[in-house]
Image (cartoon, helix red, strand yellow):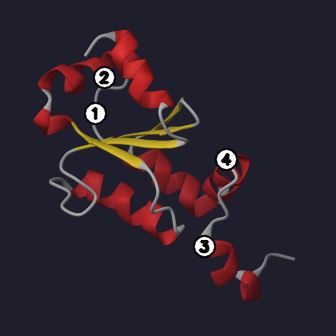
Amino acid sequence: GSREAVERLVREHPVVVFMKGSPAQPLCGFSNAVVQILRLHGVEDYRAHDVLQDPDLRQGIKNYSNWPTIPQVYLNGEFVGGCDILLQMHQNGDLVEELKKLGIRSALLDAEKDQEKK
């Protein structure tokens, strides 16, 4: 749970989620919401770390981000936020832009072509 160890995890992949449970079996509603939002965008390739398996990591990641709750989402090594912030970014279109910066094309772009804002 050291800062260095956490930093390595955060930087090991463009999209990293610290959650309770796993993407296949989230163990809290907020973690589940994060998984569902990523799924909506077609993001299946990301690293998920189950903090319930590792109390040190659970505390370490909170200290690292200065954010008291789990889940936590990191894009390109940067802390984005938890469930509420990800949901907000999903709703206002920021998440599509952030994913684009990582070279990830959101699946919603294809779904929403018809409803594009003029």
Q: CA distance from mark 4 to mark 1?
A: 25 Å
Percent position of residue 83, x then y: 38, 49
Mark 3 surroundings: few (<14), some (14-19) or many (≥20) residues within 10 A: some
Percent position of residue 42, x then y: 52, 69
Q: CA distance from mark 2 to mark 4?
A: 24 Å
Pick out the residue farthest to the right.
118
Q: Secondary structure at mark 1?
A: loop
Number of the front mark, 4 or 1: 4
Q: Is residue 1 above or below residue 22?
A: above
Q: CA distance from mark 1 to mark 3?
A: 28 Å
Q: Secondary structure at mark 2?
A: helix
Q: Secondary structure at mark 4?
A: loop
Q: Of the residues shown, which amino acid type is indicated by label 1? A: Thr
Report the side of 36 relative to 117 (left or right).
left
Q: Residue at x 52, y 53 (%)?
A: 88
Mark 2 surroundings: few (<14), some (14-19) or many (≥20) residues within 10 A: some
Mark 4 surroundings: few (<14), some (14-19) or many (≥20) residues within 10 A: few
The residue identified by callout 3 is 107
Counting residues from the start of the chain, the first of labels 4 and 3 encountered is 4
Report the side of 57 relative to 90 (left or right).
left
Q: Quadrant of residue 56?
A: top left
Mark 1 surroundings: few (<14), some (14-19) or many (≥20) residues within 10 A: some
Q: Of the residues shown, which amino acid type is indicated by label 2? A: Lys
What mark, if any, has residue 69 been given in the picture?
A: 1
Q: CA distance from mark 2 to mark 3?
A: 30 Å
The residue identified by callout 2 is 62
The residue identified by callout 4 is 102
